[in-house]
Image (tube, rainbow, N blue to C red):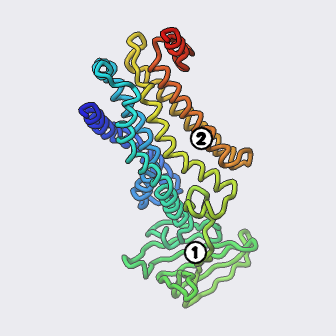
Amino acid sequence: MIFQQALRRELAYTAGAVFLVMLTFMLTSLVIRILGLAANGKASPNDVLMLIGLATIGYLSILLSATLFISTLIVLTRWYKDSEMVVWFSAGISLRDFVKPVLQFATPFIIMSLLLGMFAWPWANQQSALFRDRFQQRGVLSMIASGRFIEPANGNYVLFIEGIDAQMKNAQNVFVANAEANKVGVALSHQGHFETMPNGDRLVVMEHGRRYAGTPGQLDYRILEFERYAVKVDTKPPETEADLPAKSRLTMDLLRNPTRENMGELLWRVSLPILAFNFVMIAIPLAYVNPRLGRYTPLVFAVLIYLTYSNVINLAQAWVRSGALSFWTALVPIHLAVLFGAVMMFRYRQNRSLGGWRAVFGLGRRKADGGRA
């Protein structure tokens, strides 16, 4: 039908524009947040672009749901405002006839939202966590630069190297200071090099230098001359299985281990495609424009509905994690209530001439039909 083709074409153009605008806003927010993490030393500056890309992949499911909701609302609102809806209604098309073409357009979005939520979301979170953990566990050698004082996280010593060659093998003018049992030790040498032990430990080896050791304020300092003095700067971390948070675990892992935390995360993932479907069902009757209220009134209500719906899901997720609600008790009533509200909005728009609750339940229409009988 011409009607369905026109509607799907308008939805496609509008959804593309809305998606690009929302993606731009999201990328701007992610860039600011991740650059802040890098500036605060919580992420590597070299990983910023990768972290932004992973975060974008993780949030695509939410972005698609919002794009579907807003684009459907914009198209139908414009049709009401330009009186195109009057033309379609005069041709015998009812509001229910809009459901099929809109759902045909929305089906790929809903499927993508399902796949992204089930697979891309945990994978992106897992990779982001690995990047951050790898940076937090980085060795001292990765922080060494010419003319820079380095203090490791444990604070056992301070290392200074005036010059390092391009291959990170040899060093010139090495300084190491450490404190143990109220005694201070300072080692100096004009040259040194880096070594890696078979067990993975990494050393800075100082050659032909001196070491001063003693208690500050006293005269019991000892001066030692050495040909070789090694300082362990990195220890190979133990290989332990990563304790991933629930949002970084695969969906099958959540199902195999149904703890409260895992069920709360599963509730969020399952809710994403249902959220997209319910948004479409709400957008069709919500798009009606009352000339006395203004063209953008439906968009205001759409924002309120979106925020309320998503926050209720977040609240239900928290209740599942705390054990206050079971998975199914939290999942089914929320989405059924929203779908029921969408159906009631459909009935109200179709019978709005009756007014009030009679429009919702069609009471006036039944009474009139009974009188004619």
Q: Residue 190 in the image: x percent, y percent?
A: 48, 81
Residue sitting at x 49%, y 23%: 347
Q: Residue 98 in the image: x percent, y percent?
A: 37, 31
Among numbered discs 1 and 2, the one appearing first in the sequence: 1
- Quadrant hosting residue 65: top left
Q: Residue 160 in the image: x percent, y percent?
A: 52, 71
SS category of the residue bearing label 2: helix
| 138 lies left or right of 238 | left
Q: Amino acid at mark 2?
A: Ile
Q: Amino acid at mark 1?
A: Val
Residue sitting at x 54%, y 74%: 175
Q: Which mark is residue 176?
A: 1
- Residue 329, placed above or below residue 307: below
Q: Which is nearer the eye, 176 or 23?
A: 23
Q: Residue 265 in the image: x percent, y percent?
A: 60, 52
Residue sitting at x 64%, y 53%: 263
Disc 2: which residue: 313
Q: Residues within 10 Å of mark 1 (few under 14, many from 20)?
A: many
Q: CA distance from mark 1 to mark 2?
A: 55 Å
Where is the N terminus found, in terms of image quarters?
A: top left
Q: Which mark is residue 258?
A: none
Residue sitting at x 38%, y 12%: 291
- Residue 331, placed above or below residue 308: below
| 208 lies left or right of 328 | left
Q: Residue furthest front?
A: 373
- Quadrant hosting residue 71: top left
Q: Which is nearer the eye, 257 or 21?
A: 257
Q: Which marked residue is nearer to the observer: mark 1 or mark 2?
A: 2
Q: Which is nearer the eye, 334 or 356?
A: 356
